[in-house]
Amino acid sequence: MCIEFRNIDLLRLKKVILKDVNTVFSKGLNLIYGSSGSGKTSLLKLINLLISPSKGSIFYKDKDIQSFDIARWRSICTLTNQTTVFAEGSVMENILLPFEFKVHKLKTADNNLLESLLYRFNLTKDILDKNIKKLSGGEAQRIALIRSILLKPEIFLFDEPTSALDYNTQENVFSYLKELSKKHICVVASHSKDAKKYADFIFTIEEGKLRNV
Ligand SMILES: Nc1ncnc2c1ncn2[C@@H]1O[C@H](COP(=O)(O)OP(=O)(O)OP(=O)(O)O)[C@@H](O)[C@H]1O
Ligand SMILES: [Mg+2]
């Protein structure tokens, strides 16, 4: 079980972001490390079919991901964005919202998992009744993570999942992502040096080259 990049080039506004990338993301925590603007978010967007490569193909279980129905692919492979735009309403309403989408209709929110995630991410249950717009940046970031994890996809893509968190909370989140990655492919873009100790595979992007370090 892996995601495989074959001969991938990516140009955005004529700028080369990725050049001839051949790589595999396997089960485990795959950390993408690189300076701002190097292409981390772009790489996650390629996997999530939000953008297309200029050349080459991406395969999952030996099938070109472009051949999947997009909604179906995004139920298999969930991207938690660098910043999440929520709908009006309470935290709980926002957590449950994706379960109303056709593509997730066979899934149900696991309440026990929700409670344990709140605890693991240093949140208490009373946050569920709050207006989502009243959360701090770090609270909103953890709710976005919880919402993605509850959807139980096969593949998790996390873009800067701890950028708004204090050190201890960041450690708790990464130790959970480490557990998750025992059974799943997790691709995590992060600036955090501390993330390295949780990674099974570390990649850097520099001048269009993706290196497994
Ligand atoms: N929508 C877009 N259209 C064209 N170019 C874009 C677009 N979004 C990003 N880029 C460009 O692609 C390059 C890589 O951006 P990307 O967002 O992937 O970087 P990043 O490594 O995630 O940076 P950061 O650490 O700041 O989040 C940048 O030069 C950026 O200007
Ligand atoms: Mg980014």
Image (cartoon, rainbow, N blue to C red):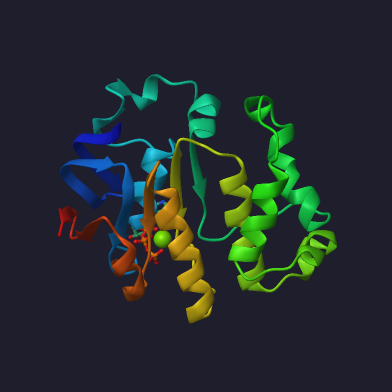
Residue 93 placed where, x, y %?
Answer: 80, 49
Nearest the viewer among 198 and 51 is 198
Residue 40 placed where, x, y %?
Answer: 34, 56
Nearest the viewer among 91 and 168 is 168
Residue at 29% across / 68% down in the picture? 196
Screen quadrant of the N terminus: top left
Residue at 52% across / 54% down in the picture? 81
Ligand 1 lies in quarter: bottom left
User: With respect to residue 60, does 172 lie above or below?
Assistant: below
Residue at 27% across / 41% down in the picture? 26
Residue 62 placed where, x, y %?
Answer: 27, 22
Nearest the viewer among 59 and 27 is 27
User: With respect to residue 59, does 171 lie above or below?
Assistant: below
The reply to whether residue 141 is in sight is no
Residue 5, quarter of picture: top left
Residue 191 placed where, x, y %?
Answer: 36, 70
Residue extending farthest to the bottom is 167
Screen quadrant of the C terminus: bottom left
Residue 201, quarter of picture: bottom left
User: With respect to residue 70, does 122 lie above or below?
Assistant: below
Q: How many labels sit on residues?
A: 0
